[in-house]
Amino acid sequence: MDVNEGLKREIGVWGLVSNSINIIIGAGIFILPVVVAQKLGSGSIWAYLICGSLMIAIMLCFAEVGSMITRTGGAYSYIETAFGKYAGFLTTNIFIFGAAVMANAAVANGLADTIGYFVPVFKLTTVRIGFFAMIYAGLAWVNIRGVSNAIFIVKFNTIAKLVPLIIIALAGWFFMVPQTEANHISITSGDLGEISLILLFAFVGAETALNVSGEIRKPEKTIPKGIILSMVIVVILYTVIQVTVQGVLGASISEFKEAPLAEVGRRMFGPLGATIVVIGASFSMFGNISGMVLNMPRILFAAARDRIGIPHFLARVQPQYKTPHISILVYAILGFVFSATGEFKQLAMLSSASYLLIYLGVVFALIRFRIKNDAGKPTYRVPGGYIIPVISIVTILWVLSNLPARELFSMVILLAILSLIYLVFKILNSSSR
């Protein structure tokens, strides 16, 4: 199901892989090894394998649906095509406000804090606000001037963030120390579910790279290859890093909650190693922001294009550069405002829950398309019939069942408010007609 949206298709397989990895690998992997190790001990690898397997299964579903529906919008377009405008409206707002803008604001503040470690002036409010304005204005300018420019920045950030992680993953094995204390912890299903919900925050993002489907070359073939390859790379890298960090730090791992990888770098190569890791973390956070500014405006663009309660002017395309310039500007402004005014906690569980709801919608969309056979013939099909989609649904529901009552209540309230807003828009549109 392809349409001409006036956008240029310039993103190939490795552009999609870079975009996907750049979004997935944010600040999380630089601090999560301690959180996971404290809860699960030597059983940490199971949490990574569970989350990694779940994400690969879900991304297989994304790959099949993405090979059928190649319009801009990613998960939004899949769910809206399958279930209508109301479902599309919920998906758009959960994506934009339930995860993206707030997460971007938190990461931007984390980036300012990290730079402040070397340059104390960044602790001043006025300097931070100016820094945020420069970041979002610069990224908006680059993205408006063409998707190829934005993808170049994404590729650069991906390489910059991967270098220290790969060094630790490979060279760290030579610095592991014999464990004098057994690090075995009794693991319950609840513990594993709780950590999986938190850890999932470090795995989400691959689907966001599909928001630029309308600018991907040969999307029927590129999307399955790029999305699956990126997830396999991330799962392997995360698992190896967790094993390495626990092997190098041993029983002292809980003493380095803020920067476990920086401590690993210091033990491997001295102060220079710690500096390299911190710089890598900074590139990782900046890369996460740049990836979101590239991808998330496409959700606004697609929702405005389909007139589902989002102002239609957001669907305008810049005549010269063929980019959704108004959506890019609006998203950048939202990101700046929340970054500059937001002294708030980054709720990893709530963000993960938001993503899981969208994943659930995409898997159900896949099942519906197969039953109705009304979305075109896929060029990629998930192996095993309905086995993987059903496993994905069951696993998502199991992980969501571990959401604390407070966060669960917040999700219900968010959905209720969005539903009310949609109903009001629908009534107003009916009245105007």
Image (spheres, rainbow, N blue to C red):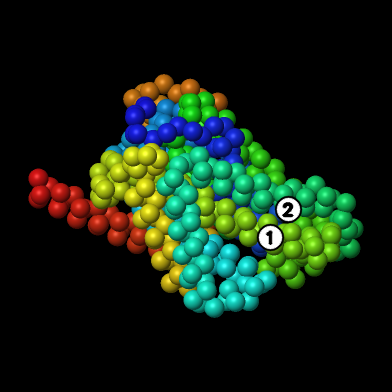
For numbered disc 2, what is the local secondary structure?
helix
Q: Is residue 185 visible?
A: no
Which image quarter holds the C terminus? top left
Determine whether the residue tagged by mark 1 lies in a helix, strand or loop. Answer: helix
Q: Residue at x 40, y 44 (%)?
A: 298
Q: Is residue 285 above or below residue 58?
A: below
| Amino acid type, residue under disc 1 in the picture | Ile
- The amino acid beneath tag 2 is Pro
Q: Residue at x 49, y 63 (%)?
A: 134
Q: Verify CB contact (< 8 Å) between mark 2 and mark 1.
A: yes
Residue 44 appears in the rendering: yes
Residue 32: image tag = none
Q: Is residue 187 left or right of residue 111?
A: right
Q: Quadrant of residue 336?
A: bottom left
Q: Residue at x 83, y 50 (%)?
A: 171
**Residue highlighted by disc 2:** 164
Q: Is residue 229 above or below residue 47?
A: above
Q: Residues within 10 Å of mark 1 (few under 14, many from 20)?
A: some
Label number found at residue 279: 1
Of mark 2 and mark 1, the one earlier in the sequence is: 2
Task: Point out residue 426 in the picture as x, y percentages from the top left corner.
Answer: 18, 49
Camera-side residue of 410 and 88: 88
